[in-house]
Image: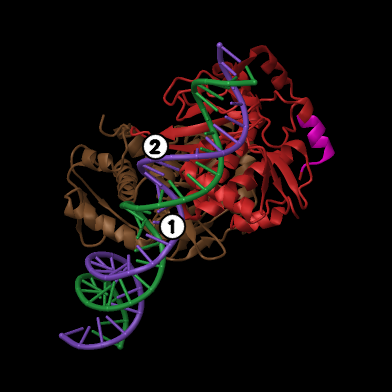
Chain colours: A red, B brown, C green, D purple
DNA sequence: GAAAATCTTTGACCCAGATCAAATGCGCGA
DNA sequence: TCGCGCATTTGATCTGGGTCAAAGATTTTC
């Protein structure tokens, strides 16, 4: 899916606001040059809240490094993560005033931002940016719906395996590691964050990870480095028939 | 939120492909006139599958009447509904070839369709259509994420109340019924369909509906007609603090 | 480099919702 | 009107994951 060309391009183009998981083919556009004028950076520390749900949001942007989460919280404190923002992911809702979710930095985070008004003005002048944004939003919608299946119908073990699968895939496509056979990647979430993502408790997350270790599906070195000796086995555990094109 | 003008407009404009929950302000566009040339209708019977997941999809369109569901199914038969399509909802993924989900007609269904290629060509020529489509997709993304909270963190009783809330709201905004105090609406889903939406079993759905009846939160006449004497009570049961602007 | 704070693991027990099973009700065609 | 098919309700029982509690690990602080 990714080839050398798109990769080198994506590496050169970390700040492109409409780059998303793959590459923006049109970065050469004159219009995009103008974005430079309204571009700025913001950094956040791990644990900091980038935006509160309901807050006015006067920028859009993308994650340059680090990880953030989109979460919803009920009055009684129950929380559900509704999105995971990894480097290259877009943040913001063009055409909307407020944020619908809390955005929380899970690790130290750097974002590349654009003030919203000028960005929207440019969007209106530049059809292919609107088009690209639509594609990105459709991707996110697919991801959200795939996650609905995970939340609604999968067992705790399958949920953990599904999460590992997703992170492994994102990691592989960002770093271009081959995904045949064994994989090694970072698990940059606490047990609690995983629980919030999966609709579980942190105890259950811990137990299921221990079980997957015991059964040889994964192994951990330290708390964050995961080795998956056989990725297709992990996919099986996730109850996932599709391999997302990575093993084809 | 809806006023007389938008309503009369929306009534006159059932076939507008980019009408969605509210009204398309630009239906007067010359470009949209051209859509007439590529427009056609399709009808489906209750229970029929409109599109299978993975099928090539050569049209986009919107629901004129009836109800359809978007569902995902695992190999072992577990299914999760990931979207509910009511009249005026858009169907399709401009720029994508295949469907990601099964689309199933829950009742008899009439759709207004447009062949995809010409529609996309028109989209490219007509920025505000792309823009409108982006807004709609953002709405759907919000709805999907709100549903993730329901699936991941709510109890069975709260799930049922949440579903009733959503259907009541959609019904109210389509039919412009006032939503102060008591509401009456149709519940056009079987217990099984509700279960698939909520990540529950049909037995649990039935039990919780009985419980809500017993506690006077709702009452049923026949199987499909629901009366909610006090909507804010239902919202409370849903664990929902926001009232979606309907009770403001 | 010891103490404190924070994560993580593991254990024991419990309960909401699943599963299995058996009525009951309802619509519809002959 | 009867009887068949199907959706729904209700009951009895089981279990996956939640809850509460207590040790380990790991990281941070001073």
Outermost residue toward the right? A4
Secondary structure at numbered mark 1: strand
Q: Which quadrant of the view contains residue A68?
A: top right
Label 2 marks a residue whose chain is: A
Residue A7 is one of the magenta-drawn residues = yes
Picture quarter with the C terminus of chain A: bottom right
Label 1 marks a residue whose chain is: B
**Inter-mark Cα distance, 2 to 1:** 40 Å
Tell me which residue sits at (46%, 43%) in the image.
Answer: A201
Q: Which quadrant of the view contains residue B190?
A: bottom left
Q: Is residue A82 left or right of residue B182?
A: right
Q: Can residue B30 be seen? A: no
Q: Residues within 10 Å of mark 1 (few under 14, many from 20)?
A: many
Extent of the magenta region: A2-10
Q: Where residue C2 sits in the image (x, y, percent)?
A: 58, 21
Residue B20 is one of the magenta-drawn residues = no
Q: Residues within 10 Å of mark 2 (few under 14, many from 20)?
A: some
Depth order, front residue of A117/B63 = A117
Q: What number is the disc on residue B110?
A: 1
Q: Is residue C26 left or right of residue C2?
A: left
- B130 over C24 or under it: above or below: above
Q: Is residue A57 left or right of residue B21?
A: right
- C14 over A17 or under it: above or below: below
Q: Is residue A90 left or right of residue B48?
A: right
Q: Where residue B157 sits in the image (x, y, percent)?
A: 30, 50
Q: Are marks 2 and 1 on the same chain?
A: no
The residue to which callout 2 is attached is: A78
Discs 2, 1 touching: Cβ within 8 Å: no
- A69 over A42 or under it: above or below: below
Secondary structure at numbered mark 2: loop
Tell me which residue sits at (47%, 36%) in the image.
Answer: B27
Q: Where residue D8 sits in the image (x, y, percent)?
A: 28, 65
């Amino acid at each position: 899916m990714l080839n050398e060309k798109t990769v080198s391009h994506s590496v050169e183009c970390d700040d492109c606001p409409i780059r998303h998981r793959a590459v923006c083919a049109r970065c050469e556009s004159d219009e995009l040059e103008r974005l430079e004028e309204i571009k700025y950076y913001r950094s956040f520390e791990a644990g900091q809240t980038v935006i509160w749900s309901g807050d006015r949001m006067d920028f859009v942007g993308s994650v340059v490094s680090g990880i953030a989460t989109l979460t919803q919280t009920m009055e009684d404190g129950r929380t559900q993560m509704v999105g995971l923002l990894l480097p290259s992911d877009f943040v913001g809702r063009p055409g909307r005033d407020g944020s619908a979710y809390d955005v929380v930095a899970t690790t130290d985070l750097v974002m590349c931002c654009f003030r919203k008004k000028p960005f929207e003005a440019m969007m209106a002048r530049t059809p292919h940016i609107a088009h690209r944004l639509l594609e990105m939003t459709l991707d996110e919608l697919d991801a959200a719906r795939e996650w609905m299946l995970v939340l609604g119908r999968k067992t705790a073990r399958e949920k953990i395996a599904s999460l590992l699968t997703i992170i492994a895939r994102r990691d592989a496509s960002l770093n271009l590691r081959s995904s045949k056979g064994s994989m090694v990647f970072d698990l940059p979430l606490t047990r609690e964050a995983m629980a919030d993502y999966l609709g579980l408790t942190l105890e259950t997350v811990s137990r299921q990870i221990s079980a997957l270790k015991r059964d040889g599906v994964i192994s951990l070195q330290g708390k964050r480095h995961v080795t998956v000796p056989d990725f297709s086995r992990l996919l099986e555990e996730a109850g996932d028939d599709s391999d997302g094109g990575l093993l084809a």
